[in-house]
Image: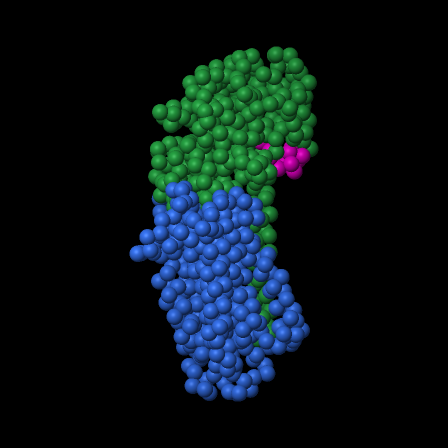
């Protein structure tokens, strides 16, 4: 495990020279099928497990009953049907979307920055969304009941503005590159975080609400949340997946990529825009769910290979299933209470993250 | 490259630290909020049926046991031992309930300042002092001869004691008997015991009448009481407001196994609420305290199957009354009884 981690993770940058070093492996169908099966299994677990018992046979019947021409009728009670289709199903679908998108965005960020510690929140998505959400929670609490889509909209806008600011600041400086982007991200993160604390201070009574939003949650999701983010997820996913081969070339370094005919600046901007779009969209409905975007791409890399033709699509499937599983755990540990899902992903993710950190340092990579 | 990695990892550490800070803040806020779970040291059972005799204050012991207030008076509470030399005329109340109590028993003219949450009655001398984190100098500025707190920060109470300012704690209560006890104790402290007795007797009579107005149902009607959404927080019947609903013969859906551990204010999942099928829903997160209305409840995914939603038995409560234990609780009970009678039909 340890030695494997040293040799395998991330596009091996330091030991790559020229074309010969490009990760050449393709995505094998078997891996894709396995990942898809994992996702479907997790989704079924998500539908079946909850505080109230709903028989698995009834769930299958109910799913088949939604398909035309089969004539299957479920034997679930009205309450069970409502729980299954209006409470659990949107939560599972949203979990799939959020987990998949965070992992995909994480793989894209890691590719663009050639940095194993990059995650979807690197350029200010989390700080911008957090500030937007806090502003709505603090100043808009009276209308909170009237329009539940104000908060996602403002959080989404905040996230995109933060990323745009980060990009503009980095581009304005000398020696524009991934390092200046990262540093600009750190600065924006700190600045917006401070403003958020100030806003929060204006209404200590809302600190509970803001706290739960910041830790992230899929609970209480409805189908509107899902439809709200699907378009952005589709666009961002297409952008990242189209560039998966280019990300491999970028892993050689800016100069080498440029010599191979890649417009490094344009590709970087496009992929960052696509990944930030999906990250901003999912964060706006789920809150700040950490670690998924960081650890899933690494897990995939260790298991299946380091080419972005493998890492990006597989991360999407594995991240989707993983987050649904985390949501099940979040709902079960203290049932009928619900843990913030960010707590679960962090408890699983943090030790994994530490292992990566230590093996990377021990390996002396990058 | 190396520097950027370190920067990223530092950002991660800062994020983790931030979460820890938020946790600490929330823990602090919970610990000192009026809905704190610390129950006063009492063996009094939850009031099952209101009696017409005046219940003695079981919460805190006063050395003066005569009906009339005799100064100097020594009062022990969880805030320490307070010695009140003479009838207090410069009271600072840092408890919204105590403020309502003081004005209800006719001691309002002796109150010089109240905290920012004490919004009732309207003529209470409201200040910007935050009861959850009171500024010592701001309180001392009023030269108080008595400070009433409700589970405020222990450090603040100790500082007051050091300055020889008597401070008495009137913590969150678990039932009406304890609420009556606080009214009587405040009456004794301020020299309005007779008037406090009258307020308590009046409350008891009204409560008795209201309890008589609800028919005992078999099985009893069930209710879900909402403190907040995202996530949903509710109360068990161990809380003051829960004990009031118990008096009216209602069963709390949160009283299931496992949630008592949460100190009376458990979090509950949407699915659990829907599965419990409550007959009544009471909203304490209305207005500027959450903006929920019966209409927003009806729109929640999956809730259309809940009996209370089907029949429209959703009652928006005044969140201020619902979170206090003042004489106004009778008004809330009247609304609840009306809703119960509607649900019975």
Relative to A234, does residue B131 appear above or below in the rendering? above
Q: Is residue B237 left or right of residue A159?
A: right
Residue at image coords 59%, 43%: B28
Q: Is residue B191 magenta?
A: no
- Identify the image quadrant of residue B344: top left
- Residue B151 counted in the magenta span: yes
Q: Position of residue B170 (x, y in %)?
A: 59, 28
The span picked out in magenta is: B149-160
Q: At which x and y percent is residue B158?
A: 67, 34
Q: Which chain is green?
A: B
Q: Which chain is blue?
A: A
Q: How is the image coloured?
A: by chain
Using the image, determine if residue A275 lies above or below residue B131.
Answer: below
> Is residue A122 in sight in this rendering?
no
Q: Quadrant of residue A82?
A: top left
Check the picture and name the quadrant holding the C terminus of chain B: top left
Residue placed at 56% from the left, 35% from the top? Answer: B264
Q: Is residue A42 left or right of residue B86?
A: left
Q: Residue drawn 47% across and 56% down? A: A44
x then y, percent, for residue A222: 39, 50
Write the residue at 54% across / 52% down. Answer: A329
């Amino acid at each position: 495990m340890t030695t494997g981690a040293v040799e395998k993770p991330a596009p091996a940058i330091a030991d790559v020279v020229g074309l010969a070093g490009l990760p050449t492996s393709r995505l094998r169908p078997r891996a894709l099928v396995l990942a898809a099966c994992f996702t479907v299994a997790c989704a079924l677990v998500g539908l079946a497990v909850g505080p109230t018992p709903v028989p698995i046979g009834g769930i299958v019947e109910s799913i088949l009953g939604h398909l035309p021409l089969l004539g299957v009728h479920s034997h679930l009670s009205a309450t069970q049907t409502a729980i299954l289709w209006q409470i659990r199903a949107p939560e599972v679908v949203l979990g799939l979307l959020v987990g998949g998108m965070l992992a995909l965005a994480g793989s894209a960020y890691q590719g663009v920055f050639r940095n194993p510690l990059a995650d979807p929140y690197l350029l200010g998505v989390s700080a911008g969304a957090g500030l937007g959400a806090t502003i709505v929670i603090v100043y808009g609490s009276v209308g909170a009941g009237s329009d539940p889509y104000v908060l996602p909209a403002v959080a989404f806008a905040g996230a995109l503005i933060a990323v745009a600011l980060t990009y503009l600041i980095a581009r304005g400086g000398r020696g524009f590159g991934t390092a200046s982007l990262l540093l600009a991200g750190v600065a924006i993160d700190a600045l917006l975080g401070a403003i958020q604390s100030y806003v929060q201070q204006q209404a200590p009574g809302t600190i509970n609400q803001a706290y739960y939003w910041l830790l992230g949650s899929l609970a209480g999701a409805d189908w509107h949340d899902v439809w709200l983010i699907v378009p952005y997820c589709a666009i961002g996913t297409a952008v990242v997946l189209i560039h998966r081969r280019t990300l491999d070339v970028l892993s050689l370094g800016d100069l080498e990529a440029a010599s191979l005919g890649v417009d490094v600046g344009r590709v970087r901007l496009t992929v960052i825009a696509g990944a930030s779009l999906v990250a901003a969209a999912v964060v706006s409905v789920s809150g700040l769910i950490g670690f998924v975007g960081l650890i899933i791409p690494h897990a995939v890399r260790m298991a299946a290979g380091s080419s972005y033709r493998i890492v990006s699509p597989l991360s999407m499937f594995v991240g989707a299933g993983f987050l649904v599983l985390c949501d099940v755990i979040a709902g079960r540990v203290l049932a009928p209470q619900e843990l913030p899902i960010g707590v679960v992903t962090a408890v699983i993710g943090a030790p994994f993250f530490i292992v990566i950190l230590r093996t990377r340092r021990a390996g002396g990579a990058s | 490259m190396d520097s950027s990695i370190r920067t990223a990892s530092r950002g991660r550490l800062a994020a983790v630290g931030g979460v820890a800070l938020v946790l600490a803040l929330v823990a602090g806020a919970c610990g000192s909020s009026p809905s704190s779970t610390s129950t006063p040291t009492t063996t009094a059972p939850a009031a099952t049926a209101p009696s017409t005799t005046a219940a003695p204050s079981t919460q805190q012991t006063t050395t003066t046991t005569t009906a009339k207030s005799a100064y100097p008076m020594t009062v022990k509470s969880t805030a320490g031992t307070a010695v009140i030399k003479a009838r207090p005329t410069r009271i600072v109340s840092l408890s919204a309930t105590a403020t309502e109590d003081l004005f209800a028993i006719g001691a309002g003219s002796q109150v010089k300042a109240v905290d920012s949450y004490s919004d009732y009655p309207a003529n209470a001398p409201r200040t910007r002092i935050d009861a959850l984190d009171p500024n010592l100098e701001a309180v001392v500025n009023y030269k108080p001869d008595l400070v009433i707190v409700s589970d405020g920060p222990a450090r603040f109470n100790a500082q007051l004691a050091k300055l020889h300012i008597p401070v008495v704690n009137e913590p969150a209560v678990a039932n009406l008997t304890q609420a009556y006890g606080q009214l009587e104790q405040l009456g004794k402290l301020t020299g309005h015991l007779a008037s406090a007795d009258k307020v308590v007797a009046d409350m008891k009579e009204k409560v008795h009448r209201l309890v008589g107005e609800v028919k005992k149902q078999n099985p009893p009607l069930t209710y879900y009481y909402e403190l907040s959404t995202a996530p949903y927080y509710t109360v068990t019947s161990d809380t003051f407001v829960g004990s009031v609903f118990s008096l009216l013969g209602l069963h709390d859906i949160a009283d299931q196994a496992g949630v008592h551990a949460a100190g009376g204010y458990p979090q509950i999942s949407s699915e659990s609420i829907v599965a419990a099928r409550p007959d009544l829903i009471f909203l304490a997160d209305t207005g500027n305290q959450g903006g929920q209305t019966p209409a927003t409840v009806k729109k929640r995914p999956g809730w259309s199957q809940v009996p209370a939603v089907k029949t429209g038995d959703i009652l928006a409560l005044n969140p201020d009354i619902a979170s206090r234990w003042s004489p106004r609780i009778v008004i809330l009970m009247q609304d609840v009884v009306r809703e119960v009678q509607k649900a019975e039909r």
